[in-house]
Structures are given as structure tokens and as C-alpha cells.
Amino acid sequence: MAEDTDTPLGGVTFDAPSTAEPPRIYPLVADDGNRRVLREWLADHDAYAVADTDEPLTAAGFDLCIVDQGGLRRYADAIETVKSAAAPALVPVLLLVSEVTPDLLEVDRGELADNAFATTVDELISLPIRQSELAWRIRALLRLRDQSLELHSRAEALRRFREAVEASGHAIWIGDADGTIEYVNPAFEATTGYAAESAVGEHASMLRASSEGDRDERVWETVEAGNAWRGEVIHRWADGERAVVDQTVAPIVDDDAVTATVAVLIDVTDERALEDRLKQHRNIVQRLDDPIMLQDRSGNFVLFNEALVEFAGIPRSALSGADEYAFMDDETATRIERQKDAVLRTESPVHYAISPTFEHSGKEAFFSTSRYPYYDEDDELAGTLAICRDVTDLEERTRQLRVMDNVLRHNIRNDMNVIRGIAADLREQTTGESAAAAATVVSHADDLLSTSEKSRAITAVLSEEVTRRPIDVAATARRVAADLDDDHSAATVVVDVPAEARALVTDEIQTAVTELAANAITHHDRESPHVEIRVVDRPAEDAVTVAVIDDGPGMPDLDREVLVSGRAIESLSHGSGLGLWLIYWIVHRSAGSIAVTDRDPRGTSVTMSLPRVDD
């Protein structure tokens, strides 16, 4: 106030300071006259705000409490509760007393000196007092409160910082201005293998794998200049392992002087190794002569190698975001589009052959293509990945061999039929050894004709494009059993199959089951062979199994090897070897496998495991 007022409060008048935000003052004055004067004065001055005295003292928010002896006597416990709850921040209490006398120490239950004064009251004013001194006392107490709040805020920030550092997943050390380590967090110990007691007191250079003079100099020159340095360095951990580390070293500056340093270490060894491998793989892919491409769900090119650019005959920039229609004939592009749709629909690989016309480059090629589903980092289906093997030369040689095979088989079959016919006539026209010799010729001629037919079947299987579709192999087994009953009346063929069992296989699967069951009957050593065809649907294994079980003499090791692994065999008897090869290739091209086991006391079980498909 510019001038004193004449209204007394115990002989005191107020001259309140002006503040930006009025502090909240809680008047806890028991004397009616003084309480009225204090409230009126506070209400007339914007420099202070009156706390809500209708609320309990412990619930009312305020910055300063003005209390007289009567108020202190009544509310001493409540004031202590408020101050304790706010600690370490200060809620100052100003006590107004009419006179400080020795008997004051005997007031308030004899606890003022030992308890109330020591823990509750922060400043004591003896009345009467001039308003300027009172105003000075109030400002001093409010400054103390502001300082306590700031100190509390700093302490709280420091606590949160320490908690954050302790919880950080990155290794952190804090040191002096020269880089001597004074603190490390738990992640530092876990990452480097150095315990805190081993690192504290050592210079940060203890982590270096080798001296990097120029770089070390640049690091500390940067930090000494008050700037942070970040880069990759090679460190050696406690176990001797070298690590690639993304390191940030920053100064802690106080009054324009570097007083400490803090460093954050991130071990990126695995990431850099992965990047190197990806770079190697990218270089390999780019150098391949076979086109490789990654396409999104719409079929547009996302990534592709240089081989595709060369075949397409258009710039790389024109290929990005385009599809096959941009550079090849529509018929082939449409066929590829159907294959992509199949992969996206079934989330299974497809294999197909194409011979596109490249209008821009003028190139001609025959590709054997494998297309796979591609998933993003969230394991969501994002598109397809295709690898196109350029088999143009192989296809040409295959065509040539197919022609030769057809010619040879045609000539052999014709000549063998002539030989068989002459031998059959001799067998009918002669007796004794001559007839037996003729019969032997007929038998061998039949074997050679059978071998020729199986050779033709194998050639057909291997020459055709692999196309798999859902087939009910339970129905297939029933058809095979019916055919065998007609052809082999002496054999007993039992079928044990479910109502339906669908597998994703090639159309030749019935040939494989027939050949396997017929082989078991033909090479049986009893007059009445017993063969069982058993089909089991195994949803848990994502498979359908077809087993052909006999009670014969067992299967030779050479035949087993053909069925299970497709490896070459040393001898083929009665054409059975080619029949087993045929079975192997049909099952192999159906993405299945074969297992052969002996039965007790005799017999063999051959089980084909085929990929199951739902309706």
C-alpha cells in the first residue's frame, strides 16, 4: 500500500507486497476483531488471495497460514498434518502473539517450545508491529516456500531421471568432465559384462577394443566444446567379445563449463551383421541371371533384380509399381495373375512354367517359376515372391530327348511285338526245349514291353508342368481296389478308407496307388496274395496317408531306396524298378513323402503321406 491504514490488528496495519500470482493465505485467527480486520484487508487487496476457510484445514490449499495463539492452540495438530503432507516443500506458518514472555513457554499444554514451535510455527511476530516489518516477514516466508518448492521440484526431477536411467534398456555411464566413470546403470552391467564396482573409477577408454587416436580426439574435442558426439565404435566387452556400438557422448554444462559427461551405448552388432548379410544377399540376387521379384497384393512390383529389367526391356523406373502386363503378352500375364491369386488365396506356394513374349526386349525364354506367399513384419500377408528359373536350354534339350525317346520306344515296341509274335508262334508249333525257349522269349518280350510303357509314363510325368488340385484319395483307393479285383482274381484286396479324404496332389496319384498295389500282388510269393489299401485323414498333421499293406516276402533294399529317396538302383527286375521310380516321382511332385516299414511276422507297409486340403 502507498500509505498506512488506521485500522489496527493488535496495533498492526498491513502493507502487502505485490506479486504476479497472489499467494493463498489461510487466516486462522481466533480473536474475532483481528480475524475480521484481516479478512477485510485481504479482500480489499489483489496482492493476496484468501484460502477457502469453509473447507477443513487439511483439505484447503494455501501458501501461508497466519495464526494467533488461540488458533494455534486449537489447530496445532491439523497444521502439523498439513506441513508433514507437504514435506519436503514448506508451508510456512506465521504466529501472531501479543507479547513474547517467559510464561509463553508454559502455554499450549507445555508443548510450544518442544513441539508446536519447533515443528509447526516458522515465524513468530510480537504485537504490536509496523506493517512494513510484517510485510517483510510475509515476503520472507513466501520466498522460503518458493525456494522449497523449487528444491522439491528439482529433487523430484532428479529422482525421475535416476529412475529412468536405472530402467533404461540402453547402457549408460556418467562420468566427470575428463571421462572417468562415476556411475553405470544396470543395463551397462548387463550389456558390457562389467560390474559397477569394476567400471566406476576407470576411464571410459577401458571399453575400447583398440586405440582409435583420431576418433578419440574428435570425440573429446566435441564434448569439451559443449556439443554431443554420436557415432559407431568398436568396443570389447568383459568376456572379450568385440561389439559394434552406436555411442552418444554428451557434455553436462553448468555456467558454460563442462562439469560432467554422460554416454549412451547401444549394441548394434547383430543389426550390422544382418545388414551385411542382406547386402550380400542383395548383391547375389542382383547378379543372378534369373528374374526375382516381390509383388504386393495388387500384383505390382515392389522389388526386383536386374535380370527382370533386362528381360522386360523397359527402364527400372517404369517397372516399379507396374505388373506383367507392362512388358509381356496379355495371355501369359493373365496366367501369371491367376497363379498370384492362387498363392494369396491359399497362402501356399505354386509352381508353374511359362514362355512369355517380351515385346520390348525381343527376348525369348522358357521359365520354371516358383511363387511363394510373402508376409510383412507384422506377419500379415503382403504379396508374393517369385523366382523364375530360365530353363530355355534345358527345355530345348528335353524336347530333343522326348523326341528321341518317342522314336526309340516306338521302334523297340514295334520290333519287340514282332519278336514276341514269332516266339509265340514257335511256342505253339514246337515241343520240348524249343517250346520252352520260345516261352522264355515271350516272357522277356512282355517284360520289355512293360518296361517301355512305364518308361513312357515316367517321361510323361516328368515332362508335364506340376499342377496340383484337391482330389478325394479315399475314392481313388476304392477305384484302384475295384480294378485290381478284376485283374487279379486270385488276390484279396481290402479297402479301409473314410467317406472322404482330400489331398492336394497331381492327377497321376491314382497311377501311383495302382502301381504300388499291383507291385505287391505281382511280387507276392503265395498263390493268394492279401493286400490292404488304407487311407487315414490326419488333420492334426495336415496330411492324408495312403498305405498299401501286404503279407508278402518283404521288399528288397534297392526297391526301398527308390521309393523313399529316389536314388539310383543297380538292377531292375521284371520292370518293377521303373514302376517304383514312377511312384516316387508322382508322390514327389505331389509334395508328399514315402515311408517303408516291415510287418511282423511278414509283409511290408508302404505309406504315402500327402498334403491335406480342407473343403
Image (cartoon, rainbow, N blue to C red):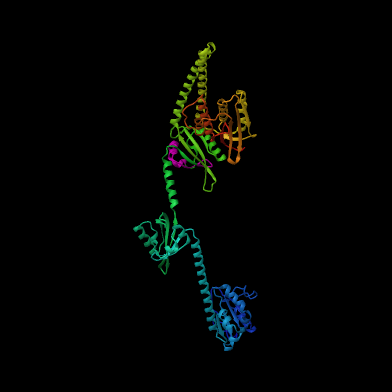
Left or right of residue 301: residue 492? right
Quadrant that contains the C terminus: top right
Magenta highlight range? 295-319
Residue 15 appears in the rendering: no
Q: Image height check: is 562 above or below 187?
A: above
Residue placed most toward the observer, 575 or 164: 575
Left or right of residue 403: residue 12? right
Quadrant that contains the N terminus: bottom right
Magenta-span inclusion, residue 297: yes
Q: Residue furthest bottom?
A: 102
Q: Residue 38: horizontal and vertical position, in percent?
A: 61, 81
Residue that appears at 50% across and 61% down: 167
Q: Residue 302: horizontal and vertical position, in percent?
A: 48, 43
Magenta-span inclusion, residue 3: no
Residue placed most toward the observer, 105 or 344: 105
Q: Residue 101: horizontal and vertical position, in percent?
A: 57, 88
